[in-house]
């Protein structure tokens, strides 16, 4: 993102090989202090951020494995940024993404892509535990206990509730299913909310309409269309009242999170304004770290758990971790800072009065 914005600002084509050689996106990513690279604040504090002997190799074998990066073709035919298979891969010909992360090379199987393991490779962990949520849901339970006997080979467009007992990730998000739901390769097509963002809003406009990196504009019309499409999937197996009621309850969870987020964010802004913490390093002090975790880890789990029938993620790993643990820690830390500041201020006045 930093790279993309910098390239645009310099009037360069962010997808070209020349720009990537000049600006070196991976190096930029590794040395910027930003909540996008949450370890950066502390690395700066302990002096390792710019240390040339520190490799930041969790970026190469972490972020980039899941997200993809530039693949640069050297004149001698060697490839840099390779191997990597993420959806954001920028190929030497300027094209984006890869197919093999869902359909492994050589086999190129639809069956593989229909199973949740194909998605769980990236959609897991503390900040987007969709695979764990699915495993704990009734749907995931049914897949684990009887999925072996389901019909995974039905031709595309002919897959339906007669073939499987419960939906997988692909069923809900991508597959043609039953008589009326068409296959899509746009995984955002059936979503209403942005659940990964700090504040949840209806799905952003897609890359056909806006520059997704720099413009994040909610599109309530497309979001409503997405919701209706998702409901059509549910309706293949459930009554529409069952599904509608579930979504009503889910939407209330998103609203609750948004309220807690607004409070968290205003606490942080007040702390900056009152001089309790400093703005220069955005992710090194306890309130900043808690603010980050409430959004990026616990708040996502809370919303995502609720969206896909994972009650433990909604409550214990979600709401409780966000509110009691992180927000509680943030509030207590700020109260201590406020008290210390009052004592400090008084002490300074005293010292001044004494001419010291
Ligand atoms: C285990 C795989 C994995 C790793 C490692 C990973 N991500 Fe992600 N990231 C994802 C997935 C999957 C999503 C989509 C989550 C969602 O929409 O619910 C995502 C979402 C994001 C988003 C939000 C995209 C948007 O549309 O708003 C950003 C930004 C991001 N990741 C940056 C990073 C950075 C930077 C790193 C390393 C510091 C990183 N990620 C590490 C898998 C990963
Ligand atoms: C029963 C249907 C269903 C199944 C099965 C399912 N999902 Fe979802 N998923 C949803 C719904 C519903 C939402 C929220 C849609 C909305 O915003 O209204 C969602 C949201 C998401 C999001 C969006 C999060 C964001 O950042 O906005 C991701 C990513 C996702 N699911 C991935 C997965 C993966 C991976 C699996 C399998 C491990 C999976 N889903 C299984 C229905 C399902
Ligand atoms: C995010 C996972 C994912 C990625 C990435 C992906 N696919 Fe698919 N693909 C699927 C799923 C799931 C199906 C099965 C759809 C169904 O059940 O209706 C599928 C089906 C297909 C089919 C048969 C159905 C049809 O529409 O004709 C083709 C061909 C295909 N994919 C090609 C590709 C190509 C080419 C790429 C890379 C540009 C790609 N896929 C990337 C998940 C993916
Ligand atoms: C190689 C890693 C990887 C795999 C495998 C993968 N995804 Fe994703 N997925 C991502 C990343 C990274 C993002 C976030 C992209 C972004 O917004 O920049 C994402 C985003 C999404 C979203 C959110 C889209 C939106 O518009 O908010 C959904 C839904 C999703 N993926 C579903 C799936 C499903 C279903 C599968 C399996 C069929 C799958 N993904 C396989 C990495 C992966
Ligand atoms: C392929 C069929 C199928 C599809 C599609 C499907 N479900 Fe289910 N769902 C089931 C089955 C089977 C059960 C288990 C019912 C039972 O207990 O007998 C279930 C259970 C549930 C439960 C109860 C889980 C619990 O732990 O209380 C909810 C809620 C639910 N589904 C919502 C949805 C929603 C919302 C959608 C669409 C996004 C959806 N389902 C799509 C088959 C499906």
Image (cartoon, helix red, strand yellow):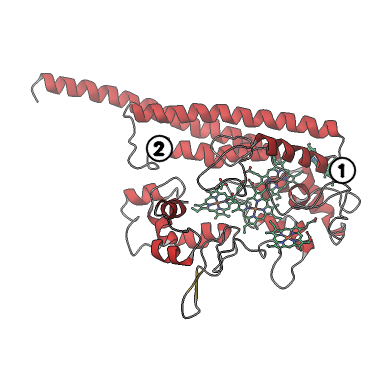
| 2 or 1: tag closer to the N-terminus | 1
Q: Is residue 312 visible?
A: no
State the SS at label 2: helix
Q: Position of residue 339 (x, y in %)?
A: 32, 23
Q: Position of residue 218 (x, y in %)?
A: 60, 37
Residue at the farthest left position: 355
Number of numbered callouts drawn: 2
Question: Dividing the picture into quarters, in which one does residue 284 lie?
Answer: top left
Residue tagged by mark 1?
236
Question: At x 38% / y 55%, what residue is drawn?
Answer: 31
Q: Is residue 62 visible?
A: yes
Question: At x 18% / y 24%, what residue is drawn?
Answer: 348
State the SS at label 1: loop
Label 1 CB sits under 8 Å from any ligand 5 atom: yes
Residue tagged by mark 2?
286
Residue at the farthest bottom position: 76
Q: Position of residue 72 (x, y in %)?
A: 49, 69
Question: Dividing the picture into quarters, in which one does residue 99 lie?
Answer: bottom right
Would residue 135 appear left or right of 256 to someone viewing this image? Answer: right
């Amino acid at each position: 993102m930093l790279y993309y914005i910098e390239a645009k600002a310099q009037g360069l084509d962010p997808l070209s090989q020349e720009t990537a050689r000049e600006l070196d996106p991976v190096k930029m990513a590794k040395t910027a202090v930003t909540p996008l690279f949450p370890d950066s604040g502390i690395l700066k504090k302990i002096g390792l951020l710019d240390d040339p002997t520190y490799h930041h190799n969790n970026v190469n074998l972490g972020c980039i494995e899941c997200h993809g990066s530039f693949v640069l073709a050297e004149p001698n035919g060697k490839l840099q940024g390779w191997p990597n298979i993420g959806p954001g891969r920028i190929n030497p010909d300027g094209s984006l993404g890869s197919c093999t992360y869902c359909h492994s090379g050589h086999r190129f199987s639809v069956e593989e892509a229909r199973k949740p393991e194909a998605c769980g490779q990236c959609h897991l962990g503390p900040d987007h535990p969709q695979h764990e949520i699915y495993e704990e849901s009734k749907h995931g339970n049914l897949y684990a206990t009887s999925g072996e006997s389901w019909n995974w080979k039905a031709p595309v467009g002919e897959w339906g509730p007669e073939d499987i007992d419960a939906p997988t990730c692909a069923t809900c998000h991508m597959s043609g299913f039953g008589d009326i739901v068409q296959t899509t390769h746009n995984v955002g097509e059936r979503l209403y909310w942005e659940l990964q963002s700090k504040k949840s809003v209806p799905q952003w406009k897609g890359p056909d309409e806006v520059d997704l990196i720099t413009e994040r504009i909610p599109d309530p019309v497309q979001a409503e269309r997405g919701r209706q499409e998702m409901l059509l999937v549910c309706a293949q197996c459930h009554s529409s009242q069952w599904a509608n009621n579930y979504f009503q309850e889910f939407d209330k969870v998103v609203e609750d999170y948004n309220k807690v987020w607004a409070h968290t964010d205003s606490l942080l802004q007040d702390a900056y304004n009152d001089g309790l913490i400093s703005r220069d390093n955005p992710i090194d002090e306890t309130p900043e770290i808690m603010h980050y975790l409430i959004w990026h880890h616990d708040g996502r789990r809370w919303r995502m758990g609720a969206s896909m029938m994972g009650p433990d993620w909604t409550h214990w790993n979600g709401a409780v971790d966000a509110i009691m643990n992180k927000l509680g820690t943030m509030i207590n830390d700020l109260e201590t800072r406020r008290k210390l500041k009052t004592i400090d201020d008084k002490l300074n006045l005293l010292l001044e009065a004494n001419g010291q």
